[in-house]
Amino acid sequence: MVGEVSKMQLLSVIGCRLALRALATALLLTLLGVVGVAFAPSAAAQGGSGSDLTSTIIFQTVSGGPIYAVNADTLAGTGANDLRYLTTGVDPALSPDGEWVAFTRWDDTQHGALGSLWVINVNGSGERVVLGEMHQPKAPVWSPDGTQIVVGMQQGGRLQPEHKCSKNLPSEPLLADEDGDYIRVVVEIDGDDVEIRFCYTLLPHPFWGLRMVDVATGAFEDLPRDRFSYAPAWDPANAWRLVYDGDMGLVNLDLNEGTTWALTEDVHDHAPVFSPDGSKIAVSYWQHDHWEVHVMNADGGGRVRLTETSLRAIVDQQISGEEPRSWNNVAPAWSPDGSQIVFLTDRTGQWEIWVMPADGSDQRPLFPGGLPEGLVLQYNGVDERVLSWQ
């Protein structure tokens, strides 16, 4: 005799408990949310001391979509009309001298699709392919001397959904069936013997590696890595050192010795980026249910959270009848002198580019009058390198 019970039914009690917890949290915020934090632009953020008014900011609207350049004098409110289209691609990155932009392209969006690494001059000329025939390359990063680029790419793993039945519950992301269920509990009874199996479909689970490419010749070398190695960052103060988002946190890679070791042991650290002097690392941090910008020392210590949704904002959301939510703040990039950080935020209800001093104070929009008409940004939470500043 065979019977089936949906796991969704088994989890209904848990769902009720989560709802009660959310209600209790909302009530607490209502009681406590009488004090807020207001952000106002500082002199430096408006083009005063410490700002980089002759530098360039590169950004993508969406992975694989348009890539734009804008002079950083936008920070002073004088460069809003300087926005210029460059090309299309994934994860643009400016070279250390600010003259070239590296990016990638994919042939299609299927898992394991072939792609290529490209460069283009910051003035829009000289676009060329550096290396092709890579699987889903992304997040290129330049060496400190500008002669090499390390790029992440898909290498092995499960590229298609896989149906399985097991005595054990799955520990990987699942694909729902036609009824919206993720797991079918199958009970088989044969006399006095009872066997319970869990049937489900695993989502594709590709592995990701790292490849170092010579910009001039296209010669390449695959690097030591974790199973999942994303968003490499090259230490500008130590050319032998690379840091990437690995299986269990941020990982150091010695390019000379070919050895790796943990920098952090927090799986919520994503997309590291070094400050220009190599003393700090900014990351996109998954803060329970949203993104925040954190900064740490280059050795992984001294972590500081730079962004946070004020209690006043939470209360204002409740008063207006909205579901309380924390803002997302993500994809940081340093200014050339390390005094400022540009990042993405959705605090206004849409993704925008904002800028702040490196201590997290005085946060304000990059474009004083709002995003140029017709410009829509997108962030999908897959270690995108949306912004670059040189």
Image: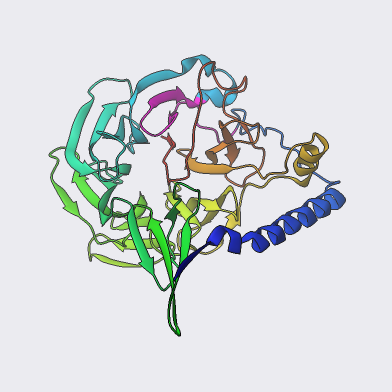
At x 18%, y 36%, the residue is: 130
> Looking at the rendering, in which quadrant would you find the C terminus?
top left
The answer to whether residue 327 of the structure is visible from this angle is yes
The image quarter in which residue 388 lies: top left
The image quarter in which residue 309 lies: top right
At x 59%, y 54%, the residue is: 287
So how many labels did they put on this image? Answer: 0
Q: Residue furthest bottom?
A: 192
At x 83%, y 37%, the residue is: 319
Residue 57 location in percent, x, y?
44, 30
Start-end of magenta stretch: 49-72
Q: Is residue 190 left or right of residue 216?
A: right
> Looking at the rendering, in which quadrant would you find the N terminus?
bottom left
Q: Is residue 172 left or right of residue 222?
A: right
The answer to whether residue 228 of the structure is visible from this angle is no
Asked if 355 appears above or below 381 in the picture, the reply is above
The foreground one among 185 and 366 is: 185
Residue 318 location in percent, x, y?
79, 40
The foreground one among 26 and 338 is: 26
Asked if 40 appears above or below 249 in the picture, the reply is above
Residue 385 location in percent, x, y?
41, 40
